[in-house]
Image: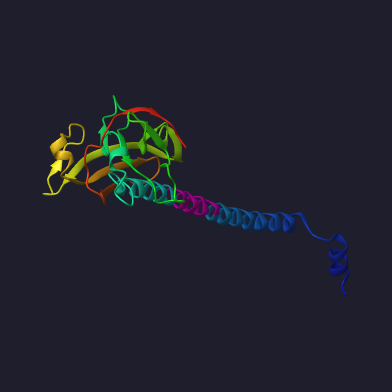
Amino acid sequence: MSVHGARRSSQGVTLIELLVALAIMGVLLAALASILNTTNTAYRTHARAVDQSEVRFLVTQILRYHVRLAGYVGSTGEQVNTVCGRSVEATKGSGSGSDALTIRYFEDRRYEADEPTNSTLCSNGDSVTHITFSASDGFFTQDGEAVVEGVTGFEVEEFVASSDEAIAPFEVSAEQLGQLTGVRIGVQFEEAAPLNLTIPFANRQNDFFGSVVEEETN
């Protein structure tokens, strides 16, 4: 080995070589950080999309379940006189407030219940399932209670009659009520496209007997 080579070996890594190595390492770390950031952003975007999809699904399922039952008078049909108020009615939200949709039916299909769930006491002393849907403070609400987060608006767009005629939702006459076959609802979300639902009624709509005097949640 030459004297020059031996001297170089004893000196170890030069400052220039160290700087080059650090520069290469910095480039690699920056590339790795960029990959991790991109992956994390994609994950958050996907998770947010999944969350919004779940919100839309939950709101859709809740509305379809209850709205379809509007006007249901019991499995035997003998409870027709126990239901009070209208089977379905809409209330216009004040100012920028969301509309409200009230659904009434006699729930006797679950657990062989003698009394309906979410019951409201009628003036004749009987009970009926009574549920009001709306949106408030970023939540989809049921009887004033927050149910699903991420909902900014709830609109009862129109009722649909048997003749496919659209009926303004807030001034439905008794005659029109008997002709209703469904309702169109619009729901707005914080981070998702609006949801437009047309939900058919499975039962005939009519004025029930008695009136609502107080609410009692079972």
Q: Which residues are magenta?
A: 40-52
Is residue 142 visible in the rendered structure shown here?
Answer: no
Q: Quadrant of residue 153?
A: top left
Drawn side of residue 115 relative to residue 196, left or right: right
Q: Name the residue located 45 percent from the left edge and 40 percent from the top edge.
A: 147
Q: Is residue 149 left or right of residue 153?
A: right
Please report the residue visible at 31 percent of the width from the left and 48 percent of the height from the top.
Answer: 69
Question: What residue sits 85% from the left and 67% below the top?
Answer: 4
As rendered, which of 191 and 29 lies closer to the eye? 191
Q: Does 59 appear in magenta?
A: no
Q: Is residue 47 magenta?
A: yes
Name which quarter of the figure residue 188 lies in: top left
Say if 175 sits above or below 44 in the image: above
- Determine whether, in the image, residue 87 is placed left or right of residue 65: left
Please provide percent x and percent y for residue 21. 70, 58
Residue 107 percent coordinates (x, y) = 38, 46
Coordinates of residue 151 in the picture (x, y in percent): 39, 39
Between residues 121 and 28, which one lies in front from this camera angle?
121
Q: Tell me where residue 214 appears, x and y as whole percent.
A: 38, 27
In the rendered view, would you say 4 is above or below 132? below
- Image-based side of 85 in relation to 160, left or right: right
